[in-house]
Image (cartoon, rainbow, N blue to C red):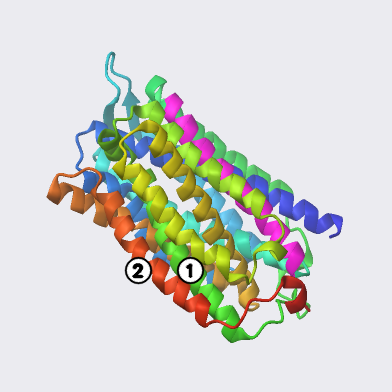
Amino acid sequence: MNEAPRAGIAATAVAAFLCDAGFYLAVFTLTHALEATGATSRAVALVLGIYTLAYAVAAPLLGGLSDRFRFLSVLSGATLFALVYTALGAALVLEPRPGEALPEVVARVADPRTLTYLAMTLLAVANALFWPALQARIGDRVEDAAGLARAIRAFNVAWTTGKASGFLVGGFLFPLDPQACLIAVAVGGWIVVGAILSEGRVGRRDRARTEAQPETTALPQGRKWAFLLSALLANFVLWGAVSTLAGLAPKLAHGLGLDVRQTGVLLCLALLAQGGTFLVLGSGKRWAYRAALLALSVPVAAGGLLLLTVTGSLASALLGAALLGACQAVTYAASVFYSLDYDERRGLRTGIHEAVLAAGGALPILGGQLADSTGELMAPVWLTLALALPAALVVGLLLWRAEPSVSLDEGTT
């Protein structure tokens, strides 16, 4: 790999880290702010749920459009992030209350719930502009499957550690100064814009699509389709489970008996396990187009969800979160790799990948409604567990019916 692709991949990793760190710090802050207003489980779940529903619609559309305007799409998304975060910091006031875990919440414009939901809708558009195009650029910049796997690993570690950092910072900073959380995400948003502008348009493939597109792995499309569909389904369920932990964190914390800091640590651990698994996966030659690891990911994650709900201790909850995060790394890496390797319409494929994530991220809405109707705070986790069992069966069947796996070396042109 020459220096230009290396520089581009490094810039992509930095942008991914900062973007997810800011976004999930904002999610942590806004869910806890609504909890402070006495919101129901469903109302808290809608913070992430509204975002994911809007994102599910916008990501394939804007992802496909980014096949013509890669750099402009990434820059537009980053700029919209920064503008929304800045507006949130100006419009929402979070004042600590002595002796209370949650702050006083005052909205200078509209009411806190309306302001939060509007911000999350706009952030869905920002993410749809940003993420499919950013991931498609990875496929544009590398010239073989092995290089693609290495680039995806760097990208996955970057956004995962960013997401984990956002939750960890939220867990410790929010109890001290909740308003500082909103200021931090605004500053971080503008740093991302500056980083993208300073990078510029790296490589000819970012300026326009050319006939010399990097080739995909030379495997039959039927086999590729089986692996892609399996990865998308598994990733839908596991992303939904992780989103349930994140989107309903204040409510699940009560069910698990955790305070705000312990909740931040739990979410951070799930993401650190995810990032560590991305590193352990290493080269795509170890796992790409090999069925066993992907087939095991959903049932093992189901075991992690059981640990979260059955034993009722902090240690078991942490172990369950770590197992869930590790398995989600497997399904996410597979979904991204198979999307970028399926054909050369990478913006469209990554847009579909992101839309599936968004659909999974909407599961907390159903879980929140279930919790409100039953009075059981852990009901959202039981819902994701109920979905994981049939999903594991379907994923196993799809992979079993696919042709025998081959190594990346055998299938690479």
- Viewer-nearest residue: 175 or 177: 175
Q: Is residue 161 visible in this depiction of the protein?
A: yes
Answer whether residue 149 is magenta in the image: yes
Foreground residue among 155 and 145: 145
- From what the image shows, is residue 279 above or below residue 392? above
Q: Quadrant of the C terminus?
A: bottom right
- Tell which residue pokes out farthest to the top in this image: 98
Cα–Cα gap, marks 2 and 1: 14 Å
User: In this view of the protein, can residue 67 be seen by the observer?
Assistant: no
Rendered location of residue 116, percent (x, y): 32, 44
Q: Is 265 one of the magenta-colored residues? A: no
Q: Amino acid at mark 2?
A: Pro
Q: Label 1 is placed on what type of residue?
A: Leu
Q: Which residue is mark 1?
A: 232
Residue 199 in the image, given as x and y percentages of width and height: 73, 50
Name the disc covering residue 390, or none: 2
Residue in front for this viewpoint, 230 or 22: 230
Horizontal side, residue 38 vs residue 363: left or right: left
What's the residue at 56%, 50% (across, down)?
A: 78
**Residue located at (60% from left, 54% from top):** 75
What segment carries the magenta color? 145-173
Q: Is residue 285 left or right of residue 321?
A: right
The residue that appears at 62% across and 66% down in the rendered structure is 337
Left or right for 377, reference 59? left
Q: Secondary structure at mark 2?
A: helix
Outermost right residue: 2
Q: Percent position (x, y) of residue 230? A: 49, 72
